[in-house]
Amino acid sequence: MSGLINISELYDLGGKVAIVTGGAEGMGKETCRFLASAGATVAVADINLPWAQKTAGEIVAAGGKAHAYQVDLGSEQSVVDLVRSVRADQGRLDILVNVAGLQDREFLEDTSVELWDKLHHVNLRGSFLTIRAAAKVMKTDGNGGRIVNIASMGAVHPIFEGLVAYNASKSGVLGLTRNAAYELAAHGITVNALLPGNVTTEGQARSPGPPIDMEKIKHMTPPLGRTGRTSDIASAILFLVAPASQWMTGQTLVVDGGHLNK
Ligand SMILES: NC(=O)c1ccc[n+]([C@@H]2O[C@H](COP(=O)([O-])OP(=O)(O)OC[C@H]3O[C@@H](n4cnc5c(N)ncnc54)[C@H](O)[C@@H]3O)[C@@H](O)[C@H]2O)c1
């Protein structure tokens, strides 16, 4: 073997169609931007249609391909309709990135059954619904596929108090990822999870919960010296949906500035 490698081919998503849930803001929005920049047609899927339209509009204005779709991950029918519409409108479906999630916090003793159910309903059941619907289309079309689920570093290690229900839902996402990967591998469909560390987003700041004890989270600055940016996560997601990672499935990629390595 000789010569140089065409690295840009390893990150080329030209001709691919991607659904990004939670694409209206935060990491999801940045993921839409990255995937469109790599050539994909992006379905910006979110419960917040006006903001999804804004994301898609900004991408199109910059020369990319994007379309907004409304979906409520809490509704089975809404998810089925989303996947059916994207396949019908765009002609194919190659990539699913599950970014949408709720980040409500509450201490263990104050965690109501309603809060527990709400977080599991959207974060875990919602991811199951999108994967199930996308896998059916990908298997039928026979072109393989890429699925990435956003969990959290809290799925594998407690970070600070008040995240019992949230982190349990994200731990479930890891089990979902491994088992879906196992079943779908024979069809050329990879399923991986990305575990972000602390990333400053407006959605996270708005999330309901008790005040955070700043003394207790002083340890939150990771060894790499800063909190995460949405682009730190989006660039790792790009790797997981690109040809570069084609021999990788059922894995968890931690992108946390070294936090879990302390
Ligand atoms: N921000 C962090 O520090 C952090 C750390 C680890 C993991 N995460 C996870 O990463 C993901 C993105 O985080 P973020 O801070 O960018 O989130 P965000 O709050 O900024 O965005 C979440 C998006 O999900 C959408 N959404 C919420 N409920 C929905 C539903 N039922 N159906 C469809 N869309 C829905 C929202 O409208 C929003 O656009 C989430 O899954 C979150 O749990 C975040």
Image (spheres, helix red, strand yellow):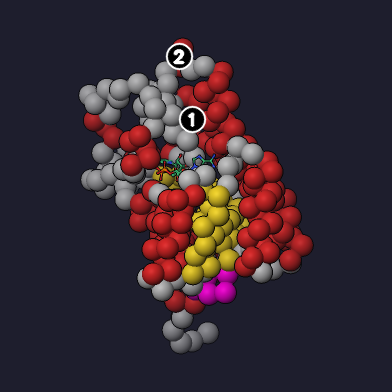
SS class, disc 1: helix
Span colored in magenta? 12-16
Q: Nearer the viewer, residue 54 or 90?
A: 54
SS class, disc 2: helix
Q: Quadrant of ligand 1?
A: top left
Q: Residues within 10 Å of mark 2 (few under 14, many from 20)?
A: few
Q: Is residue 103 above or below residue 237?
A: above
**x, y percent for residue 118:** 55, 28
Q: At x 52% / y 23%, what residue is drawn?
A: 115
**x, y percent for residue 127:** 60, 43
The answer to whether the beta carbon of the residue marked 1 is less than 8 Å from any atom of ligand 1 is: yes
User: Which residue, given by chain and number where applicable, does mark 1 sit on?
Assistant: 166
User: Which residue, given by chain and number where applicable, does mark 2 sit on?
Assistant: 110
Measure how far apart labels 1 and 2 are at the Cα level. 13 Å
Q: At x 58% / y 47%, what residue is drawn?
A: 71
Q: Nearer the viewer, residue 232 or 202?
A: 202
Question: Which residue type does callout 1 highlight?
Answer: Tyr
Question: Which residue type does callout 2 highlight?
Answer: Asp
In the picture, which quadrant includes the C terminus?
A: top left
Q: At x 64% / y 45%, what residue is drawn?
A: 78
- Asked whether residue 13 is drawn in magenta, I would say yes
Residue found farthest to the front: 50
Q: Is residue 5 above or below residue 244?
A: below
